[in-house]
Amino acid sequence: MSDIRTETMTVNMGPQHPSTHGVLRLVLELDGEVIQSVIPTIGYLHTGIEKTAEQKKWQQVIPLVERMDYLAAQSNSLAYALSVEKLLGLEMPQRVKDIRVLLAELQRIASHLIWIGTHGLEVGAVTMLFYAVRERELLLNINELIAGFRFFPSYIRIGGLREDLPRGFHAQVQEFLDRFPPKIDEFEGLLTKNDIYKRRTQGVGYVTKESAYAWGLVGPIARAGGSDYDVRKYFPYTGYETYDFKVPTATEGDVYARYTVRVAEMRESVKIAKQALDRISPTGLFACDDTRVVPPPKDKVYSEMEALIQHFLIYSQGFTVPAGDAYVPVEGPRGEHGCYIVSDGTNRPWRVKMRAPSFMAIQALPTVVQGGLIADVVSVIGSTDVVMGDCDR
Amino acid sequence: MDAQAIIDSLSPLVPGAAFEAAPSVDFATVYVPAEQIVATCQALRDSLNFESLVEVTAADYLPRAPRYEVVYHLLSVSRRLRLRLKVRVAADGTVPTVQGVYPGAGWLEREVWDMFGIVFLNHNDLRRLLMPEDWEGHPQRKDYPVQIQKSAQTYAPLEVSEEQFRANIERDRVKRTH
């Protein structure tokens, strides 16, 4: 027996591992199958978007921030637009608020669909991915309809929206919202009572409410541990206080609890989206009336000199934003998304900083998986729903 | 709750600190002296129910005299309150880490060091986070050039001479025939 070796083994997981959601690298120290320590390495997807944003005009930053969290593009641009509007002191018309709520909720569903698909794929329920991506395709079609872009619509702009809703928008969204709730039942039929799935996820990767707060994991991860903190309820923005919805919570705090919370969130999102769709008239205001920020309508540009000048100024010089700083958080699919912006009173941002929920989740990962089994790492990473574009920016 | 109310409840808890209310458009903002930031965060967490630190970042105001501002965003879920703390830091200044109060500050401060070069005293792991380990300079500084071409050093291509290459093939061939 004297020749039994007792030293630990170091295993490198990623950056090209299929279950690390992009390019996350983990250096695991293992004692047999038990994890002694984890060192996450990030930065493989760092593209310097925050630095680039400082060189752009205020309105040119929208497409940049959308590419940070690439699964929840409109959550990023909403956070950015709201922060800039806070500094400008703009108030949106009710219709713009409702359209933004609708888009944010559809975005949440789209992001959760990718999450449920990839998470299922990683723990062995390969079928999930095909079911989830099929539904997401319909949401991408809606993006294509409103903006021509499927992933990064850049439809939410500072001061409102890019243009009015296209013909057929209501019908297409209504069709999706009618079709989708039975599909959630279908997803649940595949996973919720699936014995293999439950064994992989129950009792794994505990995050309590207190440790979630301490590590800054405000969002679905904290809600699965008993918190009811949701930015939409606690600090309402774009009129969420006028919508009727519940914040799903769970108390167990394990991977399975995060699954149940997110599935319930999709149902709530459908509820909110239905209310929003009922309020939105097919045509109407799609931007505020502030001529500093919003270009004049096209027919005026062609007929009035002042409108032409204003149009030219906005697209060549941009607009200035009063000096100061602002941080307006929104509830993104992964938790609190916020954009901290600093203006020096010119037409370019002085500093743009995105608060990245994935960044915080990966930071807390070692404390969550330590002492567990190596197979659980995959299930825990999946349940935290990290997006490396969001993490590395 | 405005900044002055926060300062009034903070001042007895952190004796000797010179807090300063700052104008803001969204929520209360308080300037904190760098040496008091840990005691302030401790008091905010333990006595004023700010359970979570959601963000630490910085901004570089280059021509200005205290060059940097480190910004902390705190959240109190139980009181439905947000608070922004700001710390003025000189060009060669340092800030004590608040890791001991909020463990989530670890990577956030590391990113600030990586991007701005602001040193956080007593930080347990102040290494590069987003940039490669051997990167020179701190990209978010205002005097850091925007469009520079630099190849990363960490992954220098493996160079094999022709002799080594042939020897490898030869060795492989021998292995295969056996």
Image: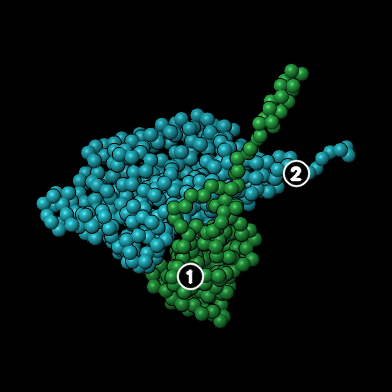
Chain colours: A cyan, B green
Specify whether residue B5 is in view.
no
Q: Name the residue furthest top.
A: B177
Q: Residues within 10 Å of mark 2 (few under 14, many from 20)?
A: some
What residue do we see at 54% from left, 42% from top?
A23
Quarter the N terminus of chain A occupies: top right
- Identify the subunit bearing mark 2: A
> Hey, which quadrant is residue A143 in on the image?
top left
Query: How many numbered tags mark residues here?
Result: 2
Q: Secondary structure at mark 2?
A: loop
- Identify the subunit bearing mark 1: B
Task: Name the spot of residue A82 as percent of width and height, x first.
Answer: 35, 57
Q: For this rendering, which residue is in front, A75 or A239? A: A75
What residue do we see at 82% from left, 40% from top?
A5
Q: For this rendering, which residue is in front, A197 or B53? A: B53
Is residue A385 left or right of A32 when viewed as pictured? left
Q: Residues within 10 Å of mark 1 (few under 14, many from 20)?
A: some
Tag 2: amino acid: Thr
Q: Secondary structure at mark 1?
A: loop
Specify whether residue B64 is in view.
yes
Co-location on one chain, circles 1 and 2: no
Is residue A369 left or right of A213 when viewed as pictured? right
Q: Which mark is residue B67?
A: 1
What residue do we see at 41% from left, 42% from top?
A109
- Mark 1–mark 2 Cα distance, whole angstroms, equals 46 Å
Task: Name the spot of residue A193 as percent of width and height, x first.
Answer: 54, 34
Q: For this rendering, which residue is in front, A283 or B113? A: B113
Q: Which mark is residue A8?
A: 2
What residue do we see at 55% from left, 70% from top?
B92
Q: Which mark is residue A187?
A: none
Task: Name the spot of residue A163 as percent of width and height, x first.
Answer: 24, 47
Tag 1: amino acid: Arg
